[in-house]
Image (cartoon, grey):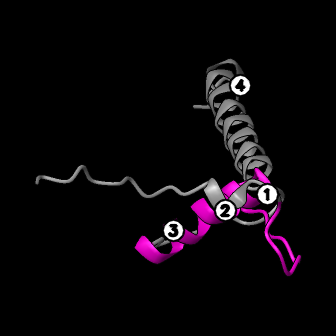
Amino acid sequence: MAVPFEALIPYGIILAMFGATGAGLSKFRNWQNGGKRARRSVDQWDRQMMNRDRRLTGNIRGQIDAARAPAGFEVNNPWKVEKRIC
């Protein structure tokens, strides 16, 4: 007994939607990372350097080759200063 093709249409639609969603998420992640591949197993050092790059260039994956930091970066410190107890 043959399976009517009408029974396979929903499976084709579901497969197409999963493919479109996967392609869209991949494209969005690529755009979000500035055209570079996504980073994996990011540790504290990588997060610190990514934060520094974001403060320098405005993009979390952007890098700059200037020998000196742009104006205003010397006061752009992400560290929080503790209040003195005494």
| Residue at figure coordinates x 46%, y 73% from the top left | 41
| Residue at figure coordinates x 78%, y 63% from the top left | 62
Q: Which mark is residue 48?
A: 3
Distance in Å between CA atoms under marks 1 and 3: 14 Å
| Residue at figure coordinates x 55%, y 57% from the top left | 77
Distance in Å between CA atoms under marks 2 and 1: 14 Å
Q: Which residue is mark 1?
A: 57
Q: Nearer the viewer, mark 2 or mark 1?
A: 2
Q: Nearer the viewer, mark 2 or mark 3?
A: 2
Q: Which residue is mark 4?
A: 5
Q: Which residue is mark 2?
A: 74
Q: Earlier in the sequence, mark 1 or mark 3?
A: 3
Amino acid tagged 4: Phe
Q: Earlier in the sequence, mark 1 or mark 4?
A: 4
Left or right: 25 as drawn, with respect to 30: left
Q: Nearer the viewer, residue 50 or 17?
A: 50
Q: Position of residue 60 (x, y in %)?
A: 68, 56
The magenta-colored residue range is 43-70
Q: Earlier in the sequence, mark 2 or mark 1?
A: 1
Q: Is residue 24 magenta?
A: no
Q: Is residue 62 above or below residue 85?
A: below
Is mark 4 in CB contact (under 8 Å) with mark 2?
no
Is mark 2 in CB contact (under 8 Å) with mark 3?
no
Amino acid tagged 1: Thr
- Mark 4, residues whose alpha carbon is within 10 Å: few (<14), some, or many (≥20)? few
